[in-house]
Image: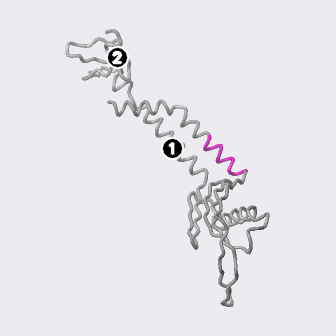
Amino acid sequence: MSRRGGFARLLRGAKWVLPAAVVLAWLLTGLSQMVQWSVMSATPPRPHMQPTITGGQTPRVARDETHFMFGQGGVYLRRMMVLTESFDATRADANSRKLAWATINSQFPGSAPLQWQVLGGGLTFAVRMWVLAIVVTAIWAAAAWWASRIVPPGHCLRCRYDLQSTTRDTEGRVLCPECGTLQATWRGDLATSGN
């Protein structure tokens, strides 16, 4: 009884949270079609020797970048090592963001719901926003269905008729006047109702 009652309290507490999450998820799905937003973090540059076609070595500078991107209908996470001649340029971070978006467009041109790719120590992970919105909607629908199955205390287990004012027989059983079901156990607290 306490486990089911605890879940019922949880569902009552989430009564407005889950529908709000559903609306927010679908609004973000629409917004992701209109904007491109990204956050980037990078490690300090370090020297790196890149092999050339002729067998020599070209001095480069490397840094590891992590991009979290929202837009183009999805959410993307991209970790990669970037090689360049210098990160001292004023536009280096802006160029890295443009490169990350261009890479996302070339690696994941379709609209598959979930994609990932691991190449050369880099990781790219993509989730379409409509997938997240459908998952949140399914959780809300399942919680609403489960909440509709919970019978309140003091009600008939079959038809949910309020039995608190119904008289009991000598054995403490209650006959539901609505559907005729004999309730073997009383699910309400008669002491609080004054009977």
Q: Is residue 22 left or right of residue 34?
A: left
82 and 113: which is toward the camera: 82
Give residue 40's quadrant in the image.
Answer: bottom right
Chain-order first, disc 1 or disc 2: 1
Q: Residue at x 34, y 16 (%)?
A: 163
Q: Position of residue 55 (x, y in %)?
A: 66, 90
Q: Secondary structure at mark 1?
A: helix
Amino acid type at image mark 1: Ala
* Residue placed furthest toward the top: 194
- Position of the C terminus by quadrant: top left
Compared to 175, does 104 lie above or below? Answer: below
Compared to 182, does 5 lie above or below? Answer: below
Q: Is residue 107 left or right of residue 6?
A: right
Q: Residue at x 58, y 73 (%)?
A: 120
- Position of the N terminus by quadrant: top left
Give residue 93's quadrant in the image.
Answer: bottom right
Amino acid type at image mark 2: Leu
139 and 145: which is toward the camera: 139
